[in-house]
Image (cartoon, grey):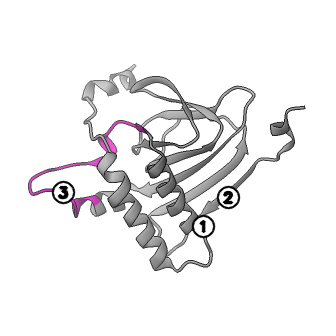
Amino acid sequence: MNSMNAIPQAFEFWQDGRMPYVEARRSCFSRTCYKSHSHPTFSIGAIDEGNSVFQSSFATAQKISAGTLVIVPAHIEHSCNPLPDQAWSYQMLHLDISWLNQWYAEFQKEGFDLNLPQHKPLIIKDESLYQAFSGMNKTLFDSEKLILEKEQSLIYCLTQLLLPHFILEEIQKTQYLYEDF
């Protein structure tokens, strides 16, 4: 018997009304597969264990493994599922796009107009970034942490660790032509 079959799937969500612009999820030993979908939020996922296949309309299917971060802009169709007959563990962070755009505006240069929902998904394989993201997410789930600590951890992770690695490529309008069929 495969030992992964004996382990029950577990998942949990974190939300706090004092930080309504962020929601987090952790899933352990999941075999659940999702059809291609999109979120109204800017989403960041991290693979903790196992392997997955990430697909979007902007790239061919890519196998990704533990320690990988996946950045998915709002409203971008994608899927990310475990390999067949395997389980995986992952974390997700969903950020309200209005809040993120407002926050990001603080870092924009004069005259530079950037709208985060119009960017392509990004896959990052970097152990230090994965650890930083995981630490931030652990802080969010920690009931002993003050809300100020949670906000500081989120902002630090976005500002110091993730934002410098975003590849901000505008999506061509022609990418949406398939919706007309």
Residue 12: image tag = 2
Q: Residue at x 80, y 38 (%)?
A: 4
Dominant SS type (magenta): loop
Mark 2 vs 1, N-terminal side: 2
Read off the residue under disc 1: 141
Query: Is residue 54 depicted above or below 101 in this figure?
Result: above
Mark 3 vs 2, N-terminal side: 2
Dot 3 alpha-carbon crowd within 10 angstroms: few under 14, some 14 to 19, many 20 or more: few
Q: CA distance from mark 3 to mark 2?
A: 35 Å
Query: Is residue 3 depicted above or below 113 in this figure?
Result: above
Read off the residue under disc 3: 108
Residue type marked 3:
Gln
Residue at the right extreme, as displayed: 1
Pinpoint residue 71: horizontal percent, then vertical percent.
43, 43
Q: CA distance from mark 2 to mark 1?
A: 9 Å
Q: Nearer the viewer, residue 178 or 11?
A: 11
Helix, strand or loop status at disc 2: strand
Cβ–Cβ below 8 Å for labels 3 and 2? no
Stretch of the chain drawn in magenta: 104-124
**Mark 2 against mark 1, which lies toward the viewer?**
1
Question: Which quarter shows the N terminus?
Answer: top right
